[in-house]
Amino acid sequence: MRLLERFPRETGRDYALRTIKDNIISLRLAPGSQISENELAAEMGLSRTPVREALIELSKVKIIEIYPQKKSVVSLIDYSMVEEARFIRNLLECAVVELDCKMAAEEDIRRLEENVQLQNFYLDNFYAESLMPLDNAFHKILFEIARKTQVFELMNNISIHFDRVRSMALSTVKNLKIVQDHEDIITAIAAREPEKARQLMESHLSRYEIDAAAIREKYPAYFKG
């Protein structure tokens, strides 16, 4: 498991929630794997209580299955849950890129371009695991430009099912396409073309469907049904 740096004044529960969620999305805690409160608490330097609270919170969005007095398991991927999360992201992010076409300043475009330059660097140097944080940062910048940071945080809380598939997509043949998508979205925003930006975002968020066969072939044990 990857341990994240704990923020100043961050509660044990919030730190546990953020760390466990990060490891689920990155597949370090793989779908179907059994997890132990005691082991997680020891690794994070916490008591069992904040870890238990974090697992309960994750069970509410059906990413963790808790069997009282027995075990907790990372849920297998349910494509119906993935589709619900993608549906919400599609509605919000398409609206956001349209706003960005009106609101983005030159400095905002540079921030997006610098992010994609780093994505290309990591892609060229075979650091695929570094792409997911940059991908997240790219989408966060889009919301920041539109002054919708609270919306981004709310969306993040419910998109974990979709994010696991995004993580898989970034380690399959799709990674080149995804980075190219980002470049095309920046071009549309810079050109003030809201309809084109929306279309590009819709296509971008649908790539997990386009290459579902490639993802399932690589991770056959991770899916329900």
Image: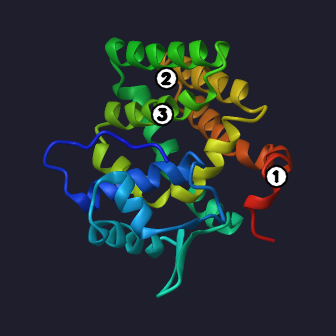
**Would you name the residue on which mark 1 appears?**
216
Q: Is 199 placed above or below 115 here?
A: below
Residue 203, compared with residue 152, is above or below; it is: above
Q: Locate residue 180 relative to residue 12 in the image: left or right.
A: right
The amino acid type, in three-letter code, at marker 2 is Ile
Report the side of 104 relative to 192 (left or right): left
Q: Earlier in the sequence, mark 2 or mark 3?
A: 3
Question: Disc 2 and disc 3: Cα gap in Å?
Answer: 22 Å
Which type of secondary structure does the marked residue at label 2 adopt?
Answer: helix
Q: Residue furthest bottom?
A: 69
Give the residue at x 70% y 64%. 79
Q: Nearer the viewer, residue 53 or 168?
A: 53
**Viewer-side residue, 217 vs 147:** 217
**Residue behind mark 2:** 189
Residues marked 3 and 1 touching at CB (< 8 Å) = no
Q: Is residue 189 above or below residue 32?
A: above
Q: Could you tell me if residue 196 is visible in this image?
A: yes
Q: Residues within 10 Å of mark 2 (few under 14, many from 20)?
A: many
The image shows residue 131, relative to residue 45, as above or below, that is above
Identity of the residue drawn at 49% across and 48% down: 1
**Could you tell me the amino acid type at mark 3?**
Pro
Give the residue number, with chain letter if any, for mark 3. 133
Q: CA distance from mark 3 to mark 1?
A: 23 Å
Please state the horizontal and vertical placement of residue 162, each as a whole percent of the image.
59, 54
Number of other residues with Cα within 10 Å of mark 1, as a class: few under 14, some 14 to 19, many 20 or more: some
Q: Can you tell which quarter of the image residue 142 is in?
A: top left
The circle drawn on residue 138 is none
- Few, some or many residues within 10 Å of mark 3 (<14, 14–19, 20+): few
